[in-house]
Amino acid sequence: MKIKQTSFQLFHVLKTVLFLLFFANFSCQKTSKIEQEISKLDVGLNIERFDQMFASSTASDLPDLKQNYPFLFSKKYTDSVWIRRMNDSIQLLQNRAVDSVFEDFSATESEIISFYQHLKYYNKAFKTPRLITVLSDVDYRNKVIITDSIVLISLDTYLGEEHEFYESFYDYIKQNLNKDQIVSDLATSYAEQLIYQPTRSTFLEEMIYFGKQLYLKDLWIPFKDNNEKIGYLPAQYQWAEDNEFYIWQYFVEKELLYDTDRKLLSRFIMPAPFSRFNLELDSESPGRLGQYMGWQIVKSYMKNNPTSVLQMLRMEADDIFNNAKFKPKK
């Protein structure tokens, strides 16, 4: 009898494993088919390298530049200002730096096109904008600017974390000043426009807001690693995964979810060198762990509920959390 029961158990386990393998294979085939469809979409994107145009221009070229790119030339400055800038030593230094990093733009262009193909697939009404590369005097707070018809990407904010231009910046800022982050920053900017969440007063609402952003990145840039989506180094993302259970336990035990203390933003949401649990392990942790946990909650919700992405983006944080069936990894 004992042998029969053991055999039955083994059979049950084997059947479960086979089902899971079949389901995983079916899901992979479905994902692969979607990706094939996406790769065939023509988004008609033409990347305009204004940074190169300006770098190679002379005073005689200025009228044409102003006519084609009037939004890049403030009317409060006279032509003499722009002409002096063409020959300014700092401007020339930035030109050389960008040329050295983006001499071959093909890999970056391929990722940008793939991002817009995914965006178009999930939003059929989306219209491809003019995408223009510029220099911004290393304004890392505005690396990407988007409107309905124009997108500006400041290439001098993606030269690599070790670049001399960034020597005075904190490490947690420098680590995302590399060209691999361009499509992730593009996705963030578009996600901010789509998410409707009028109230963000509690810690949970902040977590879910950023969780929605990161879930959209799962759809729009699946070709990027998870650490790149959230802007972590690989070791930082691994730390978050390894300690997910304990992070969640801390949030729950300290009753932070419905806390409205805005200091929680600097501790767990906004860019920072590390998250602040006020424990000895703080210096080992990456910043923005509240965003990471919000991401896991939203992913769990979408996995366990038959909801469209658009519906989810408009849902209240409480509704998502209460129906997510979220269980942190141990």
Image (cartoon, rainbow, N blue to C red):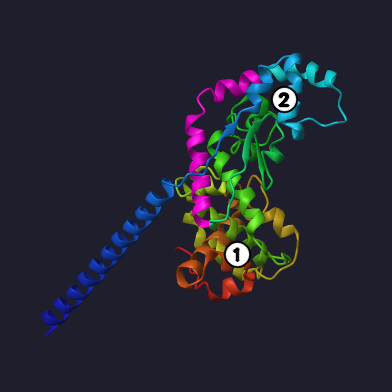
Relative height, residue 82 to residue 16 (above, below) = above
Can residue 95 be found in the magenta stretch?
Answer: yes
Give the residue furthest to the bottom: 1
Q: Position of residue 20 (x, y in %)?
A: 29, 66
Quarter residue 59 falls in? top right
Relative height, residue 322 to residue 166 (above, below) = below
Location of mark 2 (residue): 65
User: Secondary structure under badge 1?
Assistant: helix
Relative height, residue 235 to residue 311 (above, below) = above
Quarter residue 26 falls in? bottom left
Residue 222 appears in view = yes
In the image, what residue occupies the spot 30% across and 65% down? 23
Say which mark, if any, is on residue 313.
Answer: 1
User: Secondary structure under badge 2?
Assistant: helix
Say which of marks 2 and 1 sits in front: 2
In the image, what residue occupies the spot 16% across and 79% down? 8
Q: Amino acid at mark 1?
A: Leu
Residue 87 appears in view = no
Q: Who is closer to the viewer here, 38 or 67?
A: 67
Mark closer to the chain start, 2 or 1: 2
Say which mark, if any, is on residue 302.
Answer: none
Q: Position of residue 228 (x, y in %)?
A: 52, 44
Q: Disc 2 and disc 1: Cα gap in Å?
A: 40 Å
In the image, what residue occupies the spot 54% across and 39% down? 45
Q: Which residues are magenta?
A: 94-122
Q: Is residue 80 left or right of residue 195?
A: right
Q: Is residue 170 left or right of residue 243?
A: right
Q: Position of residue 25 (x, y in %)?
A: 29, 59
